[in-house]
Each structure stands twice: as structure tokens, then as C-alpha cells.
């Protein structure tokens, strides 16, 4: 219609950034509208974090079922019904997206379906297949997320797929080529290797999982090798050609051209922000040439009443970062003094073993000018890790030498994604190695490893020399 619907705060995109921002803004008394053109929950719940972790869990079940002789368990006739893998994964997604809908409704957030774009700094138009409706708002929060980058020579299709395609396959491919050894490619590559696919990872740079320290990725590479995954580094993917029932990938490495055939090629070389079709440029919202929106510490863009969060602003493209920024933006709009502080922002990779990092690495801390004392404790010296037969990896604590203040922590090992929680809390609240060492940790658990690493920092470990 012609009239504009009035609202206090309008949120564009219902991913982990947008839906969290909407709920917090509503909790703080605002009238909130959220616009979503696809599914509630965004990439994370529908085609990202949640389905990938469900699929990884299925892949572990299958792989472990066939590889538990060390535990005295031998199995025969283990089989894989991939449609059930999909069914399980889809069920998890459905429960969570349904949960998001109930939460939004419970908080009286108005849910609008359609694609939004800005008319001006106080008006937004939402289009669905038939209608368009204008909304007039006091504040807007842009949370439109990101999409996979397509590279020349690899037009997405039936055999050339992105992460969404890889999560929706009807069978485990006999052969899978993964282009890009970032966390998404490595996680999905690991999952399919567990399902029995012959996996090749082609990485353009010198190493896979470049976001993590080399000493952390070492056990991951060892494990991938054990699963039969081929990793080719400094490989430049050139082109892919769909064949009758597969795909032929051409790449260059060490000055030579190679060809590899596969059932599918998964291209995961990064994600592009969804900021190109919102009318932002016309409004004068400041962005980098890559479409990343510039924001201040309250997630405010160059236009005072418009905020931006999640994958479209600088920093890691991770769900918990989007949600964190969403809360800050909603609170700022409500007049609170909230500001982002990224020091305790964890990064995680769900490979085998898992990798997790929070705060500064040793090198970063030194670059920042700190005198550093670090302590490292191996999983192999922990009773629980031994009992789980998963002894690869370590916990490393990076502290300020003068007083043991925890500046950062890195964990490579089983359960790293959970262990990092305690260390994030410690960084956030300014704890020292002594605080961690004095905290009583349950025996026997993986949780003891950070405590032992803290004792190493203090120079008095019980369980290592
Ligand atoms: P999104 O989740 O992308 O949501 C944006 C929403 O906005 C979408 O629903 C979109 O439809 C909607 N939208 C866009 N434009 C418009 C418009 N004009 N009008 C209306 N609606 C619009 N992160 C982790 O932290 N941990 C993980 O384990 C993890 N695993 C991942 C695995 C995979 C395979 C992928 C692809 C990503 C993974 N991520 C993970 C990253 C995570 O999914 C993203 O960082 C997160 O979803 C970003 O949240 P967001 O709210 O910024 O955007």
C-alpha cells in the first residue's frame, strides 16, 4: 500500500546477528520489526554452523563405528544411509529455526517476509513476490550476512558446489575435491572423509587453516593424512568442467598443470557481504571497496541511526560475533553505553582435533609490546584424553610476564570448542594464571588441561617435568 508502517527499530536479516539484535531491542522496550527474505536463522542455522556440526557428528558416528578396535570393539557390516544423515541434520535445523520464530513472537517482534532495501535513512521498502510495503523507522540494524564467493572457471552448478550444496548432497561422493583449505572447507572435507569419500583439498597459500597458528594445525593435518585426505598447498585452481557423471578440475602447482577427476568440487574460498542490493551506496553509508560496512564501537555506520552487524562488518565471519554485535547495537539504540571489545572473541574450527583460540597468540602479544610468559600442556598427559584415546594436541596459555594476566589461549585437541569457553571467560574478566591454577577442576576431565597449563606458566606443574 501507499501508507508507511511505523516502527522504532527495523532489523534486516534474521540470522544470528539480526534475530538476537531484534530480541534484545524488544527486551529494552522498543517496537521491533524484523525482515527476512529467506529462512529465519540465516546462514548459521539453515546452511552453516548448525547443519555442518550435525553432519560432522554423523560422520564421527560412522567413522568410529568402523574404527574402534583399540577400545576392544569390532564391528561388521557397518553401513551408511545418507538419506538418514540428511534427515537427522534437517530435523536439527527445523527445531532450531522453529525456536527462533517462537522467541521472536514471544518477544513481540513483528516478522516480515520479503526483501528489504533503503529508500532513505528513515524508510525501508520490503518486497515479496506480489507486494511492496514501506516501513518508517527511527533506527535500523543491517544484518544481511554473506554469501559464497564464486571464482572464475568455477560457475556453481550440479557438480560445482558451494557449502550449501555440500550440506545437501544425496550421497557421500566417491571423490570430492575441495577448493580452499579454510575452516569451512576443512570441516566439510573431514566430514566427507569420515563418510568414506576420497578427498583432495587444494589450498592456494602455503598452508591450510591459515587463521590458526602452525603448531595448532599440525595435529589436524596428521589426522587428515591418516584419513587418506590429500592436501595440495600453493595450488591455483584454474577451471572445472562437468563431465557425464562428475567433474574434472584443473589446477596449477609448482609450475605444473594437473587434472583431477571427482564426483563433486566444493568451492569454499571465502564469503562476500550482502551489501550490494540494499541502496546503501545511494544513502552514503561508508563501505570498503569489498562492500564491508564501516562501523564504530557501537556498531553504528556513518549514518547515525543506522547500525550494521555480523558478516557485513570488519572482523571474523562467525555467528557468535554477529550475535555479540547485535546485542551491542540494540543496547546502543536504547541509549545504553555498550561497546564492542573483541579481545575475548573466540575463533573455533570443528576439525579433528578441534582448534580454538581466544585473545592474543604469543606472537600477537609480543607485537603488542607485552613481555610474555606462556605455558603449554599436552592432551597426551591428561588421563581423560587417554581414556578417550584422543591424545593429540595441547592447551597453550599466553600471559603477561609481570603478573600472569591471561592475554590469550590456544587449544588444539578433542573438546577444544568447549574448553575455550573457560579461557574466554578468563580473558574477558582479567584472570591470571594463578586464578586458573587455583580453580578446582573436576578429575578426570579435559577441563584439567588449562589448569595444568596455568601451573606450567607458574613454573610448578604436578603432571609434567
Ligand atoms: P546470516 O546468518 O548470513 O543471515 C543474514 C540473513 O539476512 C539471511 O537469512 C538472509 O536471507 C537475510 N537477508 C539478506 N539480505 C536481505 C534483504 N535485503 N532483505 C531481507 N533479508 C535479507 N560460524 C560460527 O560461529 N561457527 C561455526 O561453526 C560456523 N560454521 C559455518 C559453516 C558453514 C558451512 C558456513 C557457510 C558458515 C559457518 N559459520 C560458522 C559462519 C556463520 O554462519 C556466519 O558468520 C553467521 O551466519 C553470520 O550471521 P549474520 O547474522 O551476520 O548473517
Image (cartoon, rainbow, N blue to C red):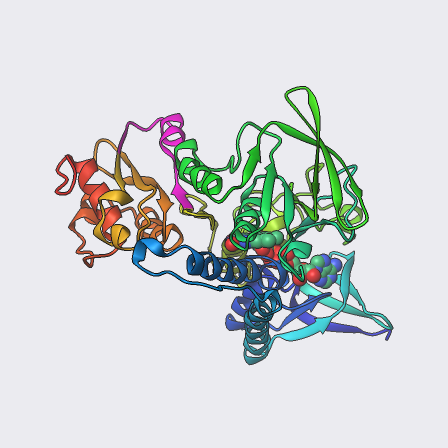
Residue 41 drawn in magenta: no
Residue drawn at x 56%, y 37% is 230
Q: Is residue 270 above or below residue 362?
A: below
Q: Position of residue 283 (x, y in %)?
A: 77, 49
User: In which quarter of the view is residue 447 placed?
Assistant: bottom left
Residue 367 drawn in magenta: yes
Residue drawn at x 36%, y 46% is 413
Residue drawn at x 26%, y 50% is 386
Q: Position of residue 262 (x, y in %)?
A: 69, 44
Relative to 388, is 113 on the left or the right? Answer: right
Tell me the quarter of the image containing the N terminus: bottom right
| Magenta residues, start to end | 355-374
Relative to 398, is 93 on the left or the right? Answer: right
Tell me the quarter of the image containing the C terminus: top left
Q: Is residue 38 above or below residue 310?
A: below
Q: Position of residue 381 (x, y in %)?
A: 22, 44
Nearer to us in this view, 72 or 414: 72
Whether residue 143 is visible to the viewer of this picture, yes or no, is no
Q: Position of residue 79 (x, y in %)?
A: 53, 64
Amino acid at each position: 500500500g501507499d501508507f508507511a508502517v511505523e516502527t522504532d527499530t527495523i532489523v534486516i536479516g534474521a540470522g544470528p546477528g539480526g534475530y538476537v539484535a531484534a530480541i534484545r531491542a524488544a527486551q529494552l522496550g522498543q517496537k521491533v520489526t524484523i525482515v527476512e527474505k529467506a529462512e529465519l536463522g540465516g546462514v548459521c542455522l539453515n546452511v552453516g554452523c548448525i547443519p555442518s556440526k550435525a553432519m560432522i557428528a554423523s560422520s564421527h558416528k560412522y567413522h568410529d563405528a568402523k574404527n574402534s578396535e583399540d577400545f576392544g570393539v569390532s564391528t561388521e557390516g557397518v553401513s551408511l544411509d545418507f538419506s538418514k544423515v540428511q534427515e537427522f541434520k534437517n530435523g536439527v535445523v527445523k527445531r532450531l529455526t522453529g525456536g527462533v520464530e517462537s522467541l521472536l513472537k514471544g518477544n513481540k517482534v513483528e516478522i516480515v517476509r520479503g526483501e528489504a532495501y533503503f529508500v532513505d535513512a528513515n524508510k525501508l521498502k520490503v518486497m515479496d513476490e506480489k507486494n511492496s510495503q514501506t516501513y518508517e523507522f527511527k533506527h535500523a540494524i543491517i544484518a544481511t550476512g554473506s554469501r559464497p564467493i564464486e571464482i572464475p572457471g568455477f560457475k556453481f552448478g550440479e557438480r560445482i558446489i558451494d557449502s550449501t550444496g555440500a550440506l545437501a548432497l544425496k550421497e557421500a561422493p566417491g571423490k570430492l575435491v575441495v577448493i580452499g583449505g579454510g575452516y569451512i572447507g576443512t570441516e566439510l572435507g573431514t566430514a566427507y572423509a569420515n563418510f568414506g569419500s576420497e578427498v583432495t583439498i587444494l589450498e592456494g597459500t602455503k598452508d591450510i587453516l591459515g587463521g590458526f597458528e602452525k603448531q595448532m594445525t599440525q595435529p589436524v593435518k596428521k589426522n587428515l593424512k591418516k584419513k587418506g585426505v590429500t592436501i595440495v598447498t600453493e595450488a591455483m585452481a584454474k577451471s572445472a568442467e562437468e563431465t557425464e557423471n562428475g567433474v574434472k578440475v584443473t589446477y596449477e602447482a609448482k609450475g605444473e598443470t594437473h587434472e583431477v577427476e571427482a564426483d563433486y568440487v566444493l568451492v569454499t574460498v571465502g564469503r562476500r557481504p550482502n551489501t550490494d542490493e540494499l541502496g546503501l551506496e545511494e544513502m552514503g553509508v561508508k563501505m570498503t571497496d569489498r562492500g564491508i560496512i564501516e562501523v564504530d564501537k557501537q556498531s553504528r555506520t556513518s549514518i547515525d541511526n543506522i547500525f550494521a552487524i555480523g558478516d557485513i562488518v570488519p572482523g571474523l565471519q562467525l555467528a557468535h560475533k554477529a550475535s555479540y554485535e547485535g546485542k551491542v547495537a540494540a543496547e546502543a539504540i536504547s541509549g545504553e553505553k555498550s561497546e564492542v571489545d573483541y579481545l575475548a572473541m573466540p575463533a573455533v574450527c570443528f576439525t579433528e582435533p578441534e582448534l580454538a583460540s581466544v585473545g592474543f597468540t604469543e606472537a600477537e602479544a609480543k607485537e603488542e609490546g607485552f613481555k610474555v610468559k606462556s605455558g603449554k600442556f599436552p592432551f597426551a598427559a591428561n588421563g581423560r584424553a587417554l581414556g578417550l584415546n584422543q591424545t593429540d594436541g595441547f592447551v597453550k596459555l599466553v600471559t603477561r610476564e609481570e603478573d600472569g594476566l591471561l592475554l590469550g589461549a590456544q587449544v588444539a585437541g578433542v573438546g577444544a570448542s568447549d574448553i575455550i569457553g573457560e579461557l574466554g571467560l578468563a580473558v574477558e574478566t582479567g584472570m591470571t594464571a594463578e586464578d586458573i591454577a587455583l580453580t578446582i577442576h573436576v578429575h578426570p576431565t579435559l577441563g584439567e588441561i588449562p589448569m595444568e597449563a596455568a601451573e606450567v606458566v607458574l613454573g610448578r606443574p604436578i603432571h609434567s617435568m
